[in-house]
Image (cartoon, rainbow, N blue to C red):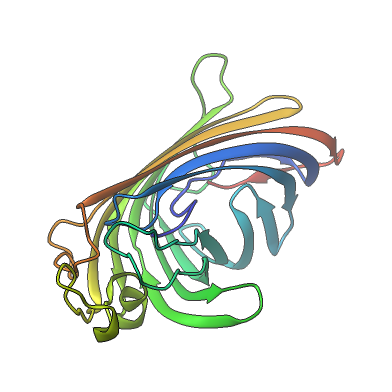
Amino acid sequence: MLLLGLNEPVFAGKEPVWEVGVGVSGVTINDYIGSSERNYYIFPIPYLVYNGDYLELDRNGAHGKLFKSEKWRIEFSGNLGPPVKSRDEGVRQGMPDLDPIFEVGPSLYYSLSETWERQYVWSLRFPVRAVFSTDFKSIEQQGWVFAPYLNFHANNIGPGDGWSFGSSFGPVFGNNRFNDYYYRVDPQFASANRSAYDAKGGYNGVRFAMSLSKRFSKVWTGFYLRYDYIGDAINEDSPLVEQRYAFLLGGGISWIFARSDDWVHVDN
């Protein structure tokens, strides 16, 4: 249900001011959290990195640096979610397809370590994002999500050094409109096997994520795992929930063919 890269820790250390490359990425993901249907995506990706004073472009997208101190940071960022197709069989049979979504909003970070520049950093992160769906002709607002989490990041570790490891854990909350998007069943789509259901806003379960990446001279590679559990979630009893877990597994590799001569320090 949620995003292809939510809670993914980023590589930290010394990086060029800008880099340009191209790569390929693959991911397998449930249609939405609670769905037993799964899709596989393989797609080319541009590799664009820019480490500016107020704007960063990296493997997770664009990040606006709104504020930073020794302990606190505020950034503006976003993420993406896949479309959901209603098949001829299954719990969504006869219901409308769901458009892909994107999320944008501010994130407040607080470092539990002395500074952001340490090799091992613990932090608390509080992203609040508005959710929008799009059919690429129009955009519709689909509510809000709040996903606070505890994050751990280790930089420049492993055999030969240069490996970056991250993990995160925390709850996910969605308001009524967001949860309606995935779990509501309007009366006209009710059937003998699928009762009408009005989703509620609130607790959407817990999420655990891990990432591992390695930066070589002209190659970047990374792997990502995310697991969601919705036992005791507010909409666990929706007829569109088939199972209480979902997982995302992805990876990618990029070839970097141009970069700046100047290097800067990149925070966790």
The answer to which quarter of the image holds residue 162 is top right
- Who is closer to the viewer here, 64 or 68? 64
Please provide percent x and percent y for residue 191: 20, 74
Horizontal side, residue 10 vs residue 244: left or right: right
Horizontal side, residue 251 vs residue 217: left or right: left
Q: Residue at point 46% right, 58% down?
A: 71
Q: Eyeballing the image, is 148 above or below 222?
A: below
Q: Eyeballing the image, is 210 above or below 216?
A: below
Q: Eyeballing the image, is 102 above or below 257?
A: below
Q: Residue at point 51% right, 76% down?
A: 132
The answer to which quarter of the image holds residue 64 is bottom right
Q: Quadrant of the N terminus?
A: bottom left
Q: Residue at point 28% right, 78% down?
A: 189
Q: Is residue 167 visible?
A: no
Please provide percent x and percent y for residue 36: 29, 50
Please provide percent x and percent y for residue 151: 38, 48
Please provide percent x and percent y for residue 139: 58, 80
Horizontal side, residue 195 vs residue 186: left or right: left
Q: Residue at point 68% right, 57% down?
A: 56
